[in-house]
Image (cartoon, rainbow, N blue to C red):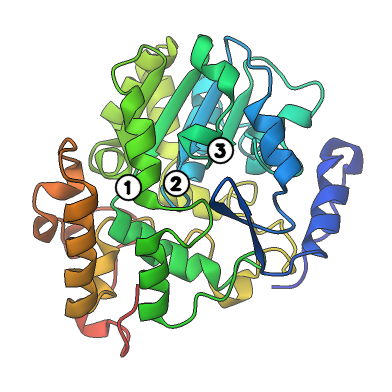
C-alpha cells in the first residue's frame, strides 16, 4: 500500500492535514515527563497538557477516557453512531480523529474552533491531569477498561508501528517497563485506580472491553441510557453492525489507513490488529504471566472484581465469536512475547 492519496476536498480536512503532516515529520521516539508521567515528544507537549488541565468544559461535553489500547476507537465509533441515531454516513465520511479529537494532543480538542455540540472528545490522561472544570460540571465521561494483559500485548505491537513511541525492545524489557509504568501515560494500575473513584457518579460510566465483546447490543443500550439518548431497535442494530471489528477494519475513515507512514507505519502491522479478548495467552510465557500476576495482585488489592478477574483461564481466545478470531495455539509465534 502506497502513501495515502490527497483528499479530494482539502478544505474539509483542514486544519488536520497540515498539522498531521507537520507532526509526522517531527517524531523522535523520545519521551518527556509531565508531573511524573511519560508522554511522546511531537504528539504532546507540556503546554498542550496544561491547556487541558485548565480548559473550560461545557455541560453537554462527552469524553471518552481510556488507558492506551483499551478500545478507544471502538468507543468513538459507537458514540459517533449513537449521536447520529444509527446513521453511518458520518463514520463513512469523516476521519475518526476528527469526530472525537484528542484533548491532550498538540492538535488538541480544546483548541479547535467551531466544534459541533455536543462535543465528543477523547483522552488518555490520568485523572490528576484531566480538566479540573469537568469535576464541577454535568459533562459526561465514559471510561473504558480492558484486561491489562491484553493492553500490554496490544501496546507492544502498536509500539512497533507508531513512530512517536520508543522501540519496545525485547518482550521481557517491555513487560518490565509496562509493569513499572515506564511507558506513555504512565502506570495502567494508577490510571484505572484513579478513575474508578468516579464510579457511582451520575456523569461517569465505567464499562469494559470484555463486557462489550460479550454483549455489544446490551452494552450499546447501556451507553445510550447513560447519555440520555435512547434508540429504537433498528437504530440500535445499525450501531451494533457498523461498529463491529470487521466493519471498522474495512472503514477507511476508522482504520487509520489515511495517516502517512511517517506517523503510523501499517506496512509492519495493522493498527486494528485482532479485536479479541484473551490474546495475551498466545504471547505471554509462563514466567511473564507469573510476574504479571504478582504485580497485579499487589497493585489491585482491595479493588472491586473486574470481568478479567473472574477466571482469566476461562476467557480462551479460541472460543471468541468475533469476526477476527485469534490464532490456534499451535500457530503461536516461536518466541512468545507481550
Which quadrant would the N terminus be assigned to in this image? Answer: bottom right
Tag 2 secondary structure:
loop
Between the C-alphas of marks 1 and 3, the distance is 15 Å
Residue 106 — which label? none
Callout 1 secondary element: loop
Residue at 64% over, 46% down: 253
Could you tell me residue 58's position as x and y percent? 63, 12
Where does label 3 land, which residue? 123
Tell whether label 3 touches label 1 (CB within 8 Å): no
Query: Does 94 appear above or below 149?
Result: above
Q: Circle 2 sits on which residue?
A: 67
Q: Quadrant of residue 268?
A: bottom right
Q: Upstream in the sequence, badge 3 or badge 2?
A: 2
Q: Position of residue 149 (x, y in %)?
A: 29, 60
Secondary element type, mark 3: strand
Q: Is residue 324 above or below residue 220?
A: below
Q: Residue 93, can we see it?
A: no
Report whether 294 appears left or right of 196.
left
Residue on which disc 1 sits:
146
Q: Earlier in the sequence, mark 1 or mark 3?
A: 3
Residue 59 seen in this snapshot: yes
In this rendered view, identify the residue nearer to me: 191 or 221: 191
Q: Mark 2 near mark 1, Cβ–Cβ under 8 Å? A: yes
Q: Earlier in the sequence, mark 2 or mark 1?
A: 2
Query: Disc 2 and disc 1: Cα gap in Å?
Result: 9 Å
**Quick one: label 1, few (<14), some, or many (20+) residues within 10 Å?**
many
Answer with the quarter of the image where residue 107 lies: top right
Amino acid at each position: 500500500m502506497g502513501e495515502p492519496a490527497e483528499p479530494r476536498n482539502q478544505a474539509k480536512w483542514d486544519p488536520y492535514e497540515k498539522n498531521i503532516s507537520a507532526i509526522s515529520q517531527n517524531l523522535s521516539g523520545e519521551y518527556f515527563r509531565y508531573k511524573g508521567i511519560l508522554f511522546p515528544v511531537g504528539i504532546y507537549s507540556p503546554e498542550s497538557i496544561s491547556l487541558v488541565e485548565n480548559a473550560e468544559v461545557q455541560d453537554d461535553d462527552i469524553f471518552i477516557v481510556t488507558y492506551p489500547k483499551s478500545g478507544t476507537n471502538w468507543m468513538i465509533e459507537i458514540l459517533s453512531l449513537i449521536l447520529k441515531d444509527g446513521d453511518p454516513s458520518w463514520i463513512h465520511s469523516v476521519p475518526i480523529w476528527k469526530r472525537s479529537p484528542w484533548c491532550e494532543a498538540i492538535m488538541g480538542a480544546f483548541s479547535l474552533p467551531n466544534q459541533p455540540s455536543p462535543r465528543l472528545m477523547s483522552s488518555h490522561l490520568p485523572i490528576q491531569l484531566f480538566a479540573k472544570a469537568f469535576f464541577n460540571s454535568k459533562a459526561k465521561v465514559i471510561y473504558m477498561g480492558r484486561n491489562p494483559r491484553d493492553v500490554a500485548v496490544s501496546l507492544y505491537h502498536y509500539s512497533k508501528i507508531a513512530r512517536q513511541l520508543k522501540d519496545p525492545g525485547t518482550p521481557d524489557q517491555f513487560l518490565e517497563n509496562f509493569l513499572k509504568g515506564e511507558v506513555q501515560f504512565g502506570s495502567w494500575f494508577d490510571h484505572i485506580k484513579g478513575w474508578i473513584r468516579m464510579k457511582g457518579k451520575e456523569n461517569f460510566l465505567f464499562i469494559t472491553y470484555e463486557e462489550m465483546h460479550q454483549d455489544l447490543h446490551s452494552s450499546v443500550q447501556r451507553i445510550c441510557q447513560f447519555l440520555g439518548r435512547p434508540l429504537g431497535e433498528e437504530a440500535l442494530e445499525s450501531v451494533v453492525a457498523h461498529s463491529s471489528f470487521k466493519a471498522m477494519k474495512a472503514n477507511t475513515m476508522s482504520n487509520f489507513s489515511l495517516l502517512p507512514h511517517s506517523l503510523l507505519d501499517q506496512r509492519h502491522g495493522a493498527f486494528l490488529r485482532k479485536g479479541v479478548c484473551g490474546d495475551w495467552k498466545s504471547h505471554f510465557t509462563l514466567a511473564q504471566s507469573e510476574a504479571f500476576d504478582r504485580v497485579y495482585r499487589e497493585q489491585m488489592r482491595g479493588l472491586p472484581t473486574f470481568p478479567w478477574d473472574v477466571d482469566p483461564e476461562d476467557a480462551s481466545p479460541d472460543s471468541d465469536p468475533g469476526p477476527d478470531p485469534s490464532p490456534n495455539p499451535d500457530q503461536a509465534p516461536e518466541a512468545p512475547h507481550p
